[in-house]
Amino acid sequence: MPKTTKAKKKVTKSKTKVVSKPKKAAAKAPIKISKAYLPKDTEKYMCEKHKVFFRIRLNEWKKELVKANNDALYNGSMDDNSISADIVDQASSYTDKNVEMKAINRQIKLISEIDKALMRIRDDTYGYCLDTAEPIGLKRLMARPVAKYTIAAQEKHEKDEKVHADD
């Protein structure tokens, strides 16, 4: 009989240990939105639906840019290595390639901005100005999903850049 008592004490101790462990937070069910969903001003600003909407929009935009860059680099006129005897044709070809490369570089920078915006969504800072922490606004984010600043803060940044560029 004493052996049973000891076993019960051990069981009691192990139960105590289980209870004393911190409980893990329950995983949230993923928010689903329809393809026709558009964020509304009547909803709480940057609620889960808004975040899901902008995450999907940014990821689709990124995929389009990557595909366009790949098409331009691998299937476009960038592979044209033919040398023309006419110097005007050579200059025109060089100019066309230069313009295309500048466009690709701009798209690569935009992809980087999209990645940063996706990180802000994960950090729960997306939709808020990096300078003032004020809401950027749904209309501005719909027009420019990678926006980091409110319109007033963006104008200030552009004014500061212009002042420094003039130096």
Image: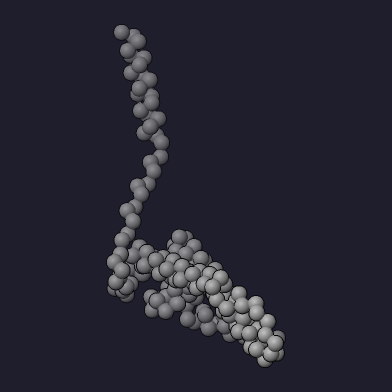
Colour treatment of the image: one colour
Farthest residue in the bottom direction?
88
Q: Answer whether residue 101 is visible to the viewer in this image.
A: no
Farthest residue in the top direction?
1
Farthest residue in the front direction?
85
Where is residue 64 drawn, in percent x and y?
46, 71
Residue at image location 35% in from the left, 23% down from the top: 12
**Where 62 falls versus 84 (above or below)?**
above
Quarter of the figure with the N terminus:
top left
Quarter of the figure with the C terminus:
bottom right
Q: Is residue 101 left or right of residue 125?
A: right
Residue at image location 40% in from the left, 69% down from the top: 57
Give the camera-side residue of 138 and 9.
138
What is the count of numbered marks?
0
Where is residue 113 drawn, in percent x and y?
53, 70
Where is residue 61 drawn, in percent x and y?
44, 71
Q: Is residue 78 left or right of residue 45?
A: right
Q: Is residue 18 left or right of residue 69?
A: left
**Where 14 falls versus 159 (above or below)?**
above
Residue 59 occupies quadrant: bottom left
Q: Answer whether residue 103 is visible to the viewer in this image.
A: yes
Residue at image location 38% in from the left, 24% down from the top: 13
Residue at image location 42% in from the left, 75% down from the top: 141
